[in-house]
Structures are given as structure tokens and as C-alpha cells.
């Protein structure tokens, strides 16, 4: 039996209005893969108001099998089920969450190791960290294998090497990077909180959401779930 994503599917059919003030988010909203699926209501010098919902690509029939085969790992069933339905895109909340496609997950994993001079051969360093959500400035949300079973969602800071988040004696120094115990728990929290706070364990006291929700759900909106 597949993962129950009914709580998430309801939000795909909702149309909401947000006022974004963060420059990076305003720029991201104007990129073609996002802009074509949102209604821009107003634009000012320091803000942009948009109306829309999540924008997700058609699913990948094999889920994340390509990631498993490339790196010799086993990822959770809920991640497979998500990617079988939606092969990345972005979640529209008070914070934008650009979700990587299966191929982007593979390329990003290799690119980070290559640029930093870390091993790219799966046999030389455990591939127990996979970035799946671009949080800007080369920071990502990532799936990290737990010491026991399962995979948790962590903050993969650009300032921290993959090996420091994977190898136990180093990873112990980065306990605060853990955001949620699983991908499904993370996705549910995004829905329950409208995407904020995105990570209480690592947020600074002055952190504020980059947008304000100024419109409520329109149940009649049931279009635009694919790119």
C-alpha cells in the first residue's frame, strides 16, 4: 500500500495569496518554471504579491530508483511514492521550497563532492546524504541516513562538508542540523505550518518568513498541478 498523501493533495488544489519581500524569492518567482504558473497581483520596489499553489512536475515511474542504483543505497518508501507522483517542482508556502528532480538529486550529490575534493566513488565514502530541496545560497535540505534505520531531514549548510554530516565522529558535532525524523514528517509539518518555521533547531532569533500570507484557500482551484 502506498503512502497516503491526501493531506498534501488537498493543498495542491488550493489557491493562496502571498506577499514576498525577500529579494531572492522575488527573483525565483520570476523564473519561467515558476512565473508561468502563478498570477502576479502586484509588484512594488520591495515586494511582490502572487496568487497560486504548488507547482509540481509529473511523476517518475521508478520513483528514486535511479538514485539508489547510482549510489548503492535504499531510500524510504515514502520518498519513492512522492517521486512516483511528483518529480520535483516547488512548494509555495510562506517560504519557497524548490524540490529537486531525481536527476537533479544525483547531479547535486556528485557536484558537491567534486567541488570540495571529497570522494565521488560510492565505495570510498558512504552516500548517506542526498540534497532534495534548494534553500538558496548553496544551502539545502537533505535526506541523511540515521545511525539505525530510516532517513531524517537535515539542514545541509554550504559551510559543512558532506563527510562531516555523515561520518559518526564528526556528525555528532552537528546535532542541531536535524529538522525532522523523516521526509513524511517534514512534508506534514510544511502543510501544518504553511512552511514556517522551516527548521526551529537551526533558526536564529531574528529569522522571519520571507512572505506573508494575505489570502486564504480557494477550494474551487483545481488546476495547474503539472509543469
Image: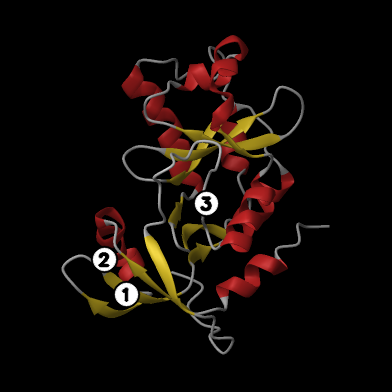
| Up-down relation of residue 49 to residue 193 (above or below) | below
Q: Mark 3 packing: few (<14 Cα in 10 Å), some, or many (20+)? A: some
**Image coords of residue 24 (percent x, y):** 27, 53
Residue at numbered disc 2: 30
Query: Of label 2 and label 3, which has the lower sequence position?
Result: 2
Viewer-side label of 2, 3? 3
Q: Secondary structure at mark 2?
A: loop
Q: Mark 1 packing: few (<14 Cα in 10 Å), some, or many (20+)? A: many
What is the CA distance from the residue labelled 1 to the residue labelled 3? Answer: 20 Å
Query: Of label 2 and label 1, which has the lower sequence position?
Result: 2
Give residue 20's quadrant in the image: bottom left
Q: Secondary structure at mark 1?
A: strand
Q: Residue at x 49, y 63 (%)?
A: 57
User: In this image, 46 relative to 217: left or right?
Assistant: left
Q: Residue at x 69, y 27 (%)?
A: 146
Viewer-side label of 2, 1? 1
Residue at numbered disc 3: 197
Which quadrant: the C terminus? bottom left
Which quadrant: the N terminus? bottom right
| Up-down relation of residue 20 to residue 104 (above or below) | below
Amino acid at each position: 500500500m502506498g503512502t497516503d498523501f491526501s493531506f498534501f493533495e488537498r493543498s495542491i488544489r488550493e489557491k493562496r495569496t502571498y506577499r514576498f519581500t525577500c529579494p531572492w524569492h522575488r527573483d525565483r518567482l520570476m523564473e519561467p518554471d515558476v512565473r508561468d504558473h502563478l498570477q502576479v497581483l502586484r509588484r512594488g520596489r520591495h515586494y511582490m504579491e502572487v496568487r497560486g499553489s504548488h507547482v509540481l512536475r509529473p511523476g517518475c515511474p521508478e520513483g528514486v530508483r535511479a538514485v539508489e542504483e547510482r549510489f548503492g543505497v535504499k531510500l524510504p518508501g515514502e520518498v519513492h511514492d512522492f517521486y512516483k507522483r511528483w518529480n520535483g517542482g516547488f512548494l509555495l508556502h510562506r517560504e519557497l521550497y524548490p524540490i529537486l528532480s531525481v536527476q537533479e538529486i544525483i547531479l547535486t550529490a556528485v557536484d558537491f563532492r567534486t567541488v570540495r575534493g571529497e570522494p565521488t566513488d560510492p565505495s570510498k565514502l558512504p552516500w548517506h546524504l542526498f540534497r532534495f530541496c534548494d534553500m538558496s545560497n548553496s544551502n539545502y535540505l537533505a535526506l541523511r541516513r540515521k545511525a539505525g534505520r530510516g532517513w531524517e531531514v537535515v539542514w545541509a549548510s554550504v559551510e559543512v562538508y558532506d563527510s562531516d554530516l555523515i561520518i559518526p565522529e564528526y556528525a555528532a558535532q552537528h546535532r542541531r542540523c536535524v529538522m525532522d525524523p523523516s521526509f513524511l514528517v517534514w512534508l506534514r509539518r510544511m502543510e501544518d505550518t504553511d512552511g514556517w518555521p522551516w527548521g526551529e533547531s537551526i533558526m536564529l532569533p531574528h529569522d522571519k518568513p520571507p512572505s506573508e500570507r494575505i489570502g486564504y484557500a480557494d477550494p474551487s482551484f483545481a488546476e495547474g498541478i503539472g509543469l
